[in-house]
Image (cartoon, rainbow, N blue to C red):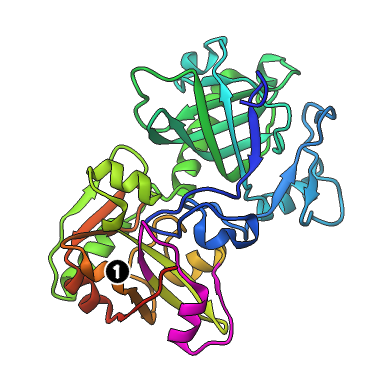
Amino acid sequence: MDSPRGRSTAAGDVGGGPGHGGGPVPAATLPEHLAGPLDAGHRRWAHEPGRGVPAGGHRASGRGGRPGGPGCGSPQGLRALAAVVETLVRFESERVPGKGRGRQLGFPTMNLRIPENLQLEYGIYACWVQAGDRTYPGALHYGPVLVFGEADPSLEVHLLDSAPEDTPPVLRVEVVRWIRPVQSFPSPEALRAQMEQDVAACRRALGLEGEGPDRVAAELRRRGVGVRVHRFGQSTRTAQEAAQALGTTPERIVKSVLFLADGDPVLVLVSGAHRVSPAKLAQATGARRVRPADADTVARITGFPAGAVPPVGHPTRLPVYMDRALVEADLLYAGAGAPDALFEIRPEDLRRVTSAEVVDLHE
């Protein structure tokens, strides 16, 4: 850690997963390689060090774009903020003692030391929390707890699923999506009711609700392949997480990465041990320019959030290119439409059900 208060960074070197890309990369090429739903299409909002947000207010200081017009403390500004803020913030921080209020409200939280350079506005966020060697979905609170008359901000995370028995002293957090601003409530009971809604919103934002795996399994059966879908009590968004959950190697993990080739969407299947070569993909597609799709485009075209994209089950049929290295495996595991779901399939069946063109695509 850079300091006893923790470390915060804008994401730029996160490993990729079954539903997106993979490997340490600079921010300029982030969309293909980011872990799960984080994407360069998301906008970053910085909290200016030393300049707090007044109770009841919510000021954004933007980098890479900000809503125009009224300040974000106004209703107009809050609506604009809700429409655009999907953060690209990762940080690690020490656990610190809390007051036990979350547990009293039925939502136990872990209190974290606020990093000095935390680039985050006050609010409630959907996030992923790495505790030791496992990753859990979470809801993050950053700001004052106004219902208890506290003006000083706190940083607290509630794990949406079961928490580990022995939580390590340092946690790593990936902030995925802004849910709502910090606000005051007339009573703890009203806050509890809102927290129930917040948890549901975080689950939706993280792709943990819906019929994704069922839809994928049904589509595979329709195409003549019966598969077994594995559900895990932890994230399988990255190739490393998926391989660890299965007890296998990244070479057997299939990443489904959406690219735009001269503006047209194409789906690339590559192993978790490799990165896609844009030059090879351009040659295979005959396009002059190829680039990874951003998160909004991924969700709109595939019907699944980035980080949980399967190779089948999309609203429209996509041209699919399969890296030749995948054919060499005896068994593969691909994303099943949720960030905690995978299905197993033989390489020849994957090629057949996707009508993929097999070419050399990895760097």
Quarter of the C terminus within the rendering:
bottom left
Quarter of the N terminus within the rendering:
top right
Q: Residues within 10 Å of mark 1 (few under 14, many from 20)?
A: some
The answer to whether 182 is drawn above or below residue 187 in the figure is: below
For label 1, the SS is: helix
The answer to whether 137 is drawn above or below residue 259 in the figure is: above
The answer to whether 24 is drawn above or below residue 260 in the figure is: above
The answer to if 178 sits in the magenta stretch is no
Residue highlighted by disc 1? 325
Front residue of this view, candidates 335 and 162:
335
Residue lying farthest bottom? Answer: 286
* Count of labels in the image: 1
- The spot of residue 339 in percent (x, y) is 37, 49
- The spot of residue 323 in percent (x, y) is 34, 72
Q: Which residues are magenta?
A: 269-293
Front residue of this view, candidates 234 and 18:
18
Left or right of 124 in this view: 306: left
Residue at coordinates 47% horizontally, 49% vertically from top-left?
A: 15
- The spot of residue 216 in percent (x, y) is 27, 64
Left or right of 126 in this view: 2: right
- The spot of residue 74 in percent (x, y) is 81, 43
The answer to whether 276 is drawn above or below residue 359 in the figure is: above
The answer to if 275 sits in the magenta stretch is yes
Residue at coordinates 56% horizontally, 32% vertically from top-left?
A: 140
Residue at coordinates 36% horizontally, 66% vertically from top-left?
A: 270
Q: Amino acid at mark 1?
A: Ala
Front residue of this view, candidates 164 and 270:
270
